[in-house]
Amino acid sequence: MKKYLLFFAALSSLAHYAFSDDFDSQNKTQDEVQKKVKLDTSIVKASMMNSKLDELNRNVYEIDKESIADKGYRSTEDIFRYTPFVGLSNVGLGSNLDLRGQGNRANTSVQVLINGIYSNMLDSSHGVTPLNTLSPSSIESIEILPGGGAVMYGNGTRGGVVNIITQKRYEQPFFTAGLSYGNTIASTGHSYNADAKFGTKLGDRTYISLGAAYINRGGPRSGDKTSGAQANMGLIYDITQGGGEHSVSFDVDYFNGIIRTSPNNSFMDIKNPSKDDRKTPGNGSLHNTQQRLDVSLGYKGELSENSKLDIKAFYHLNHINYVDSLTRLSSFRAMGNQASSNASADQSGSLFDDQKAGITAKYDLKHTNGLFILGVESIWNHGKRTMDQMIQATGYKHRILVPFVGTKWSNALYALEKYDFSKSFSLTGGARYEYAYYDIDVSYFSDMTISNTTNTTNTTNTTNGSLTDSLHNYALELTPNYRYSDSGNMYAKYEKGYFSPSPNSMLKRSRSGSRSTYTATNLKKETYDTFELGLKDFLGDSVMFSASAFYTLTHNEFYTQGNAHSISGVTYGNYDKTQRAGLELFAEQYLFGGGLSLSESFTYIDARILQNNGTSANLKIPYVSNYKGTIGANLALGRIFSIWSQNTFFGTSYDITQEKIKPYSLTDIGLNAKFGDLSLSAGVRNVFDTFYYSYYNHDSKDQIAGYAFLIGQGRSAFIEGRYTF
């Protein structure tokens, strides 16, 4: 870690030296102006203004389309492995985006938007955000706001907010089509991806874009395959002639796919995993189907020269069917007895369904001394989960059926004021109030038969539970900002935020003798306080640097033990206190007349449980790497060719049993070529064939959904062609 920090500082110093003449120059020739650096073309750009995600003084980072293209990404998840500050947290059911050390709470503490639509699943026991239903080629940009955002974005933003954008205006006719092939050298996966997009302006007022993508993605293991199709359309109509002061928009994005894979590899089958086990499938077979639909209708209007109104109505669907789902168990202990080795758990017929419908409205007023923002939200969220599981072994047969339906209707009002006391100093303050209404129904059916040589016993249990409740939450923010130069500013931020629980965490099943009953969990209200210091500066036209330090103290943080597929179910509770403290550094340089661009980032996080049940705990929050570093470079070789490299370093993390997961690093290299409208790229991902885990859980108590692992993708090669005009 020390070596990385020294390298980070050395690159920034090199950039300063390389452009020292430009910094001292008072006058530039026209040729020099034309060569002015555009940080937009580098790997990540840090936006100070005009961000769709945040219009205030924050460190918002944007990944543009050019940074995503030609890198051989097989999935949207792959993009974030090389993205500054963003981690991937996998608790066994898929990866969620993590900011500032949320770990196994990432699915409920980092808000992910798709074109401004909330996409986190309501069911926190599953809760995998549908990242991989988006083809990387469909993404126009990604905006990242590390830390907070509770006043403007509400619940589940302790770690931050990520907005993935797939639509834009095309003033001129635009068409692009691409075809890519990837081969996993160290494994068995083959990937074929194709995409096309068209956009243009129709007449004086109408903009249209149409896109489609086909995904056929292999995985590290034998039998892993994801196939599907994505289609999207965007329409914008300017109500006023030629000005765009008032416009309406309609966006739709749809994905339909099939996932064929096997269960996570079990430590019961492979005690000491190695590279040789990459191709080994899990013990069983899984066949899932997934649909995602996002639809929105929006209005944007300039009500006056200084005020505007933005209204959006939306609908979101994410539906997953477990068509065939069979996990074979090397051994299974039932009712204190050791069953034979032919045990299995069949969850065919299970499903997850998440639907959201809502409306958001935001009013912006620029006044003499700053900016005032007023917003309202009303979001109806309906989550449905059906677990249908049959566990069988010699002398043992147990069916468990748990249909769960939960509805959460949230209504919020927020206001923010950024007041400029002078050209150098401003103060931003805001507050949010949210009212959430819950309606929950769940039932539990169990039919268990145990046989031996002398007798057979059968136990049947049925119980139902329901709950209606309402919660009131609020958030506060105070952010002083000081602009110490034309290009540099520093800020301090305080935020009080909250977590509004998922319906599935509000009821628990308890067993008394042979009977089960549902009762309210009565969890304590989770709140947090975040303190942050940050700065951002541009050195000349070619170097950007930002830094922030943060500390978050959470009171009564919710925790979950087990998941929706565990035989023992899910247990919910509160930790008394948890903390997350860290440092985020980022820099970009555009050197030597634009021929070389560099990007570096470093994140350090200390995430731990401080107190539980009134006693000191000092445990690590699971699945949080204590650091992440990135280094990216792009070197132009004349007008046609360029080479690039991207590197990511992940620090130590811990699983739910507090067992250490070793650090690792990944390196990709590639070559791009552009011949007029045709571009070609080829490269190698994970050049050094690093062994790492994408999922790790050494909890031997959970034989069905836990005590398992997944080995990350090995070395792979890709080639990609694209035609654009």
Image (cartoon, helix red, strand yellow):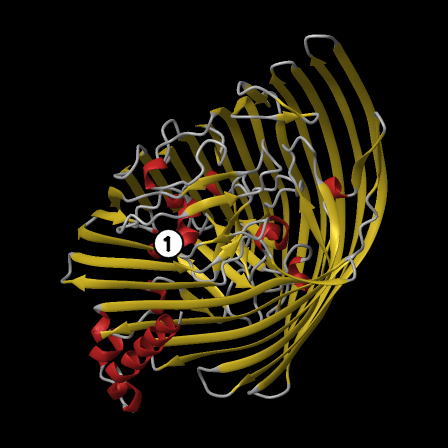
Above or below, comparing residue 630 to residue 571 in the picture: below
Residue 206 in the figure: left or right of residue 649: right
Q: Which residue lies furthest to the top in this view?
A: 454
Where is residue 536 shown, x and y percent of the image? 47, 77
Q: Which residue is drawn at 30% across and 36% down?
A: 187
Residue 336 in the figure: left or right of residue 1: right
Q: Which residue is drawn at 21% across and 64% down?
A: 635
Crowd class of label 1 (few under 14; some 14 to 19; many from 20; radius 10 Å): many
Q: Residue at x 55, y 71 (%)?
A: 58
Q: Quadrant of the N terminus?
A: bottom left
The mark total stands at: 1
Amino acid type at mark 1:
Lys
Name the residue beneath numbered marker 1. Answer: 65
Observer-nearest residue: 238 or 602? 602
Provide the secondary structure element on which disc 1 rests.
helix
Residue 51 in the figure: left or right of residue 396: left
Observer-nearest residue: 555 or 190? 555
Where is residue 315 shown, x and y percent of the image? 62, 40
